[in-house]
Amino acid sequence: MGSLCSRQRHYNQADSEENAQTAEIERRIEQETKAEKHIQKLLLLGAGDSGKSTIFKQIKLLFQSGFDEAELKGYIPVIHANVYQTIKILHDGAKELAQTEEDSLKYVISDENKENGEKLAEIGARFDYPCLTKELAQDIEALWRDNAIQETYSRGNELQVPDCTQYLMENLQRLSDTNYVPTKEDVLYARVRTTGVVEIQFSPVGQKKRSGEVYRLFDVGGQRNERRKWIHLFEGVTAVIFCVAISEYDRTLFEDDNKNRMVETKELFEWVLKQPCFEKTAFMLFLNKFDLFEKKVLQVPLNVCEWYKDYQPVSTGKQEIEHAYEFVKKKFEELYFQSTAPNCVDRVFKIYRTTALDQKLIKKTFKLVDETLRRRNLFEAGLL
Amino acid sequence: MASCAVEGGCPSDYVAVSISILSIILLLAKAVAPYLIYKIPRPKGSSFWLVAIQVLASFNLLLSIVMALNFLKFKGRHWWNSCYIWAVWLEGPLGFGLLLSCRIVQGFQLYNIFVKRRLPPIRSYIFLPLVLLPWIAGSVFIHMKKPLNNLCHMGTQWIIPVICLHALYIAVLVGLTGAVQHVEFRFHELKDLWRGILVSACCIGIWVVAYILNEVHEEISWVQIVSRFLLLVTTSILVLAFFSISLSQPLVSLMSLRKKDHPEYETMGHALGIPDSGLLLQGEPTQFADPNEPLDKLLLNRKFRQSFMAFADSCLAGESVHFYDEVQQLEKVPDNDHVRRIYMARHIIDKYIAPGATMEVNISHRCRQEILSTLDLAHPDLFKNAVNELMQLMKMNLVNDYWSSTFFMKLKEDMRTVNHELEEFGGWNFSHRLSSVHCADDPFHQEHSPSKPDSNICDSDLQ
């Protein structure tokens, strides 16, 4: 700035205006670069279907202006698509099981629903879905109540049945209403496979206050082909929020029918931990889908997953759930320490139990994350 | 003179050895040049390894001839002077046998892909050792029986089965080439195979003559010298002529070193002569960028497609759009032109479907398996399910953000300038149209408000 002032003496009036403009621009650039340095980069990583995009939506709801009516209505085709896709998966699954299983009679769809089923499967195979009318909703509900479909649903872990199936099927009447406006809950349940990278910028204390931290959050796809794009985001990351769907220990991948989801997540977590760019990055492990875990762990033992094969159940009911959860948490802690090189041991590592659909819980969890990061920043700046 | 015929070191020997060194250098240059000159990335998988193995096998063959026939004078006998290493192992399973096995693998792959129209059932890295097995067995047998004299010559009763083994492999190669000769290849596959057969047949002919001369006239030194000189020189030339870059697929031959033969191709579609699609016709109304239209109709238009593709690339989600584009090109090839369909289908599979591919797309396991284990690579509906899945993905992820992106605005600007030239159509004001559509069921409705706080990466400069 000083040099600019001294130069001004040598120029005449017209040029000095230009100089003032240049100075203004330079000052703005400097401000922005300083502001950029204060933006903390957060990455949401995890395998496919682990809840990253739901957490992303929650953050949008909590710390930005939320969803206005237009945005909510924008989710209608997504929700309808979910309905069609789900019923198609169940229908095709029932047909397949009827052919391959010995006890095939219980998977055979009853005659009155057969035609319905074929029609809905054909609709589900198009890429342009019709609007969900009351009529179609009734057909879908009739098919859903068929015994064969219910039996197939109970074996949903072998097919790629989405988690929101129960919720969608129970609310069909409301979803097919002509003036339907999705609720926030509907939007959170809606399932879209993310491709590419999406980002938002937010400040946890609200946009008005200037003293808050500014975060830039990136959401990515979790399937195997999407992971080669992650590397573009790995520079200068403040914290990685790694999401794990702990209820998926008995399911296989969407992109590979032969790999168990938990084992894949374990390998992925190891890989992420060993990345050289994450030497100083904080790791927040979100053990997600706890609500589904609670229900499942009492019916399906943990040792169906080969990583959990040394699990021993001790009791029943709530105690058992807690015990199982502690077991899973310990497994991940062990994994973390095994995969952390000696030069990275002082990076922050915290585990949180989450249910991405629960807004209060996510708000509380994120406040904890924010506190941890702020404390870490102060520590790094030598003030703590 | 007599001593150098037996021990090696004659001037003609040195000339022959230097010719063979020259041919190896030229071979390496030929193999590496397309990658260095055009800066193509190194290919992965069988297309790289088969070529590397060819170069190695050629080198082994020449080295085996040099060492086995005593071209160079070595003081004393060392353990590595053993005839069996050079004349048996290096010449057979690691030299001539390996060269021919590579070509047989190529022929087999071409047969599977173009005649049976499916992807090869056995991976080439498993198939190659299998084909090499008879050579290894033969070498082990000879090694145990030890029939070689100290001049590295076998008796007649051994030469005949050895030559028969060589000839057998050439016959297998002829058989495979015959099975594919009716296919109209677009690149030099058939020519390469015939050239390989010719070269190896010449090789065998010359060897037979040289061996006979060497054996029968072991005492006449000038026969020895001349025959081995000829042997090495012709093998050097033939090793060069045998070499082919595009062993398993015509990727590098898309960019030839001799520009006058073929112009440079950027995409497989160009190389196959498929025209670009979706040019805006003169009479077409320019309302293509109507958000009400379904995505597949919008993508038919080339300008929209290119703009949308650029947008998707900026969000790191471009592979779906590129895949859709190339499948559209595939659909333009007529159904009865099996060969071109198979080339294009194979290219699409290698680029988008194979696990670990450079632009792998996000499709389900079942969809991928259906494509990889198909029984007919030329089937018109091969990629239909994949396209459906990816259209859904694009609709849910990319389309809404596209309408509020800079790419769409640029497209509008371009169309507006075109609009001014087509005076029949009174100026369509696109932004007017966008914001005036209010329909509860309109999936593409988007308030045209750049003040939205969230955005895709590409829009960060908007803020």
Image (spheres, coloured by chain):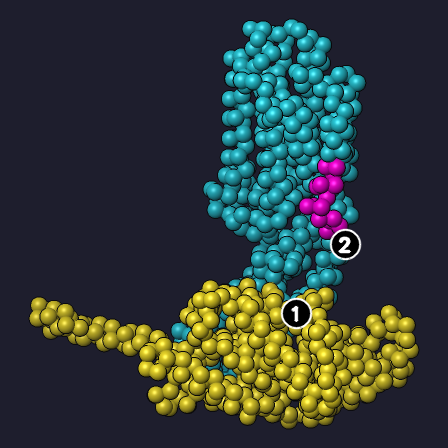
Residue topped by disc 1: A263
The answer to if B136 sits in the magenta stretch is no
Q: Give the position of the N terminus of chain B as an image quadrant.
A: top right
Q: Secondary structure at mark 2?
A: loop
In the depicted structure, whether residue B225 falls above or below residue B432: above
Asked where in the image residue A258 lies, by quadrant, the reply is bottom right
What's the magenta region? Answer: B119-133
Q: In percent of the image, x 8 and y 68: which residue is there?
A: A10
Callout 2 amino acid: Asp
Q: Color used for chain A?
A: yellow
In the depicted structure, whether residue B154 falls above or below residue A77: above
Asked whether, in this view, residue A112 is left or right of residue B107, the answer is right
Please tell me which residue lies in front, B440 or B65.
B65
Residue B201 image point, x, y percent: 70, 25
Residue topped by disc 2: B376
Residue A43 image point, x, y percent: 49, 75
The answer to if B129 sits in the magenta stretch is yes
Asked whether, in this view, residue A60 is left or right of residue A49, the answer is left
Q: In percent of the image, x 67 and y 58: which residue is there?
A: B331
Q: Color used for chain B?
A: cyan
In the depicted structure, whether residue A4 falls above or below residue A110: above
Please tell me which residue lies in front, B85 or A221.
B85
Q: In percent of the image, x 63 and y 41: which residue is there?
A: B50
Q: Do we see residue A373 in this rendering?
A: yes
Asked whether, in this view, residue A110 is left or right of residue B122, the answer is right
Q: Are marks 2 and 1 on the same chain?
A: no
Q: Give the position of the C terminus of chain B as an image quadrant.
A: bottom left
Subunit bearing disc 2: B
Subunit bearing disc 1: A
Asked where in the image residue B137 lies, by quadrant, the reply is top right
* Mark 2 and mark 1: Cα distance apart in space: 35 Å
